[in-house]
Image (spheres, grey):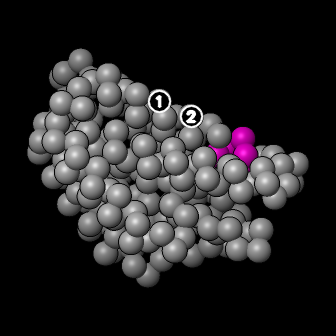
Amino acid sequence: MTHTHATVVTGTPVGPVIQKMWDEEREHLDTMEKLAAKHNVRHTILAPIFGGAAYVLGLTSALLGKEGAMACTIAVEELIGQHYNNQLKELLADDPEAHKELLEKITKMRDDELHHHELGIKYDGLKSTRSVVHVSYRYHCVQRDIITILYIDEFTCTYVLIEMKDRFFASISFHA
């Protein structure tokens, strides 16, 4: 969800749920930023383009109201769950003991994202024009499939990308 989503649902029963998801996403971002710093990874030069596209997609889904915001959440979290699971499989196949700390972090973030997916369904995301949002996110992600998208913060339109290169994890993040 974007910050705009929070504005759309302020004062509704879903408001506190959005706030909790927001807090968890900020936690994820902090974790990923620390990983980026630990591995001396720089931000991508394409950040302004991706950030602008993410902002437009977030704004568009927020304009669809609560259901649109929740549909956006469902679409994003479904993909994020898949990407996290793929990353976990690679780490487990490589060396679970060597990647123990990272496995724990990714598992926690994955579980949070899947919970957000469930909340999107619970709060009427399937009643929206979900297919339009879903296709947009799939297309947006496939265009960058050269690297594994591990985290998309739909609240702040921040993307953190991780890829495995010779057993080294790199993180690229940017803010809209």
Mark yes or no: residue 43 visible.
no
**Residue 51 rendering spot, x and y as whole percentages:** 32, 66
Residues tagged 1 and 2 counted as in contact (Cβ below 8 A): yes
Q: Residue furthest top?
A: 13
Q: Quadrant of residue 123?
A: top left
Which segment did they paint magenta?
Answer: 102-106
The kind of residue tagged 2 is Asp
Q: Dot 1: few (<14), some (14–19), or many (≥20) neighbours within 10 Å?
A: some
The residue that mark 1 highlights is 115
As drawn, 100 above or below 138:
above
Residue carrying label 2: 111
Q: For the point 83% across and 49% down, which residue is it?
A: 96
- Mark 1 residue type: His
Secondary structure mostly taken by the magenta-highlighted segment of the chain:
helix
Q: Residue at x 44, y 53 (%)?
A: 152
**Up/down of 35 relative to 124, above or below:** below
Rendering quarter of residue 136: bottom left
134 versus 136 height, above or below: above
Q: Nearer the viewer, residue 109 or 83?
A: 83
> Residue 1 appears at what percent x and percent y?
31, 44
* Residue at image location 52% in from the left, 48% down from the top: 82
Is 104 magenta? The answer is yes
